[in-house]
Amino acid sequence: MNIKEQQQKAGVLLHISSLPLGVLGQNAFQFVDFLVETGVSVWQTLPLNLPHSDGSPYQCLSAHAGNPAFISIQKLAEKGLVTPTDLVSYFSNHSPVHKHKLLAKAYETFRETAGIARQLAFRRFCRKHAHWLNDFALFLVLRNVFEHQGWNQWPAGYKDRDDKLLAKANKQHADEIRLIKFIQFIFFEQWLELKHYANLKGVQMFGDVPIFVAYDSADVWANPGLFKLDERGNMTVVAGVPPDYFSATGQRWGNPHYNWRVMERDGFKWWLERMATQHQLFDIVRIDHFRGLQAAWEIPANEDTAINGRWTLAPGDALLAAIYKRFPKMHLVAEDLGIITPEVNALREKYHLPGMKILQFAFGGGDDNAYLPHHIGRNGVVYTGTHDNDTTLGWYYSAEEHVKRHFHAYIGTDQPRMPDAMMQMALESKANLAIIPMQDILALDGAHRMNTPGTIENNWNWRFNWAQLSDERKDEFRQMVLHSGRAPH
């Protein structure tokens, strides 16, 4: 995605779970209207996939399947798939178990009352997505049967995908499997309705693809040969990053590494199928940990830390060439944060991919810091902060004195209005796309951050409400976007 020739744009970062109610219903459409009113033309979300119990959208049960928690029961009621009474019961009980019961009821109503066109649409969806949907549906069923154990703990025949056993399970659990497929049909339908509405209003949807997938996922269970596993299905190496300034032991993420040699043999079919789903769902897609497409840190699976890992090369050039050959109009963004080598930069620049510039990382060092606004070029995406950062107000309150002094000197005042000063800095930069997290628009402090890397509790839960967005605050943000020249002409 070369964005050098495009008009500069403004975007807002807000995950679907952070909407009021956290679903693809009225609030999502209202949020699009808010973006249009303020001159914003890009809505960035986190991955939409179904997470594990920790709620992280970067560790999911499938690289394709959407999160059923985002489905709007109200929209199902509008289509007559659940009753008004069901809707009232849902608003008094938002538990996942109760929601699943309502989705099951919606499926029964669909089977009994849907017209031929709707039934055909469901069948077409199942055929189109069969390459992942069949395995995913069976994976979820078996995961329930085996009490949510990881697939590597299942009985041997299921773990190793014995054809006869899986055929028997598909037959035995046919109704549950059809329900899972129907839920995915509804998720995709509701998301694409929102995307269509946004696109009609001039708003592009900006998604996110984690470079690695979770070990306990339908992807690894269904395609073990594509990953570095031993003969028993256990990981031989895991992903992470090496020790650095921030961590003396590095980070051990625990994801399986790709067996790139095997993937190359069929022209990266698995990756192309994955990107086909993202291309359908989004107008722009960020590749998280882009540097892993050039080389990734491999840690022996029996190591408790990332210290004793090593860099192993990845065929990112061949993969990106295959992606662009299949999807010549796909717009990709590279998450190129951290320690980036000349080889990684060369790969990104060869395909004209915008990199990311984070203003919270710009201050406290030397004038050669690449994140300082005067170093940021057109073909980039600038952020005040990302989902992994503190809110800008939280950052400012907790910043060390030398960081604040540098920031104050840069903007020419020691009494900045925060977070507006940082937001203006992003919007007035040369970057063709400036993304502002919703927390900064609402001027919220660090108690409202989305995620704190390295921790496993109290993350991914932040949600805003419309009462936090006053007319005055909305107008202030709109004026910032207009004065930066980023509002649509």
Image (cartoon, rainbow, N blue to C red):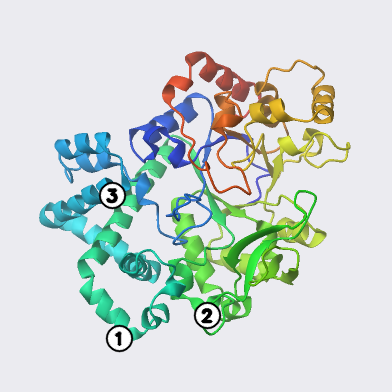
Q: Secondary structure at mark 3?
A: helix
Question: What's the mark number on residue 164?
Answer: 1
Horizontal and vertical percent position of residue 442: 54, 24
Visible residue check, residue 108: yes
Q: Position of residue 365 (x, y in %)?
A: 86, 37
In the rendered structure, which amino acid carries the disc numbered 2? Answer: Gly
Q: Nearer the viewer, residue 363 or 374?
A: 363
Compared to 353, does 407 lie above or below? Answer: above
Task: Find residue 323 and report its image quarter.
Answer: bottom right
Task: Identify the residue at horizontal 81%, vertical 59% (top origin).
Answer: 342
Local crowd at mark 2 within 10 Å, few (<14), some, or many (≥20)?
A: some
Q: CA distance from mark 2 to mark 3?
A: 35 Å
Residue lying at 82% horizontally and 19% vertically, measured from the top left: 412
Q: Amino acid at mark 3?
A: Val
250 and 91: which is toward the camera = 250
**Which percent across, then down, holds residue 125?**
31, 61
Q: Is residue 396 above or below residue 254?
A: above
- Disc 1 crowd rating (10 Å Cα; few below 14, some 14-19, many 20+) is few
Label 1 to label 2: alpha-carbon separation:
20 Å
Query: What amino acid is labelled 1 in the image?
Result: Lys
**Between tags 2 and 3, which lies in front?**
3
Give the residue at mark 3: 97
Return the disc, 1 or 2, that comes first in the chain's sequence: 1
Residue located beneath label 2 in the image: 225
Crowding at mark 3 (Cα within 10 Å: few <14, some 14-19, many 20+) = few
Q: Quadrant of the C terminus?
A: top right
Query: Mark number for residue 25?
Result: none
Vertical order, 262 against 351 (above or below): below
The secondary structure type at the circle numbered 2 is helix
**Residue 296 falls in image quadrant:** bottom right
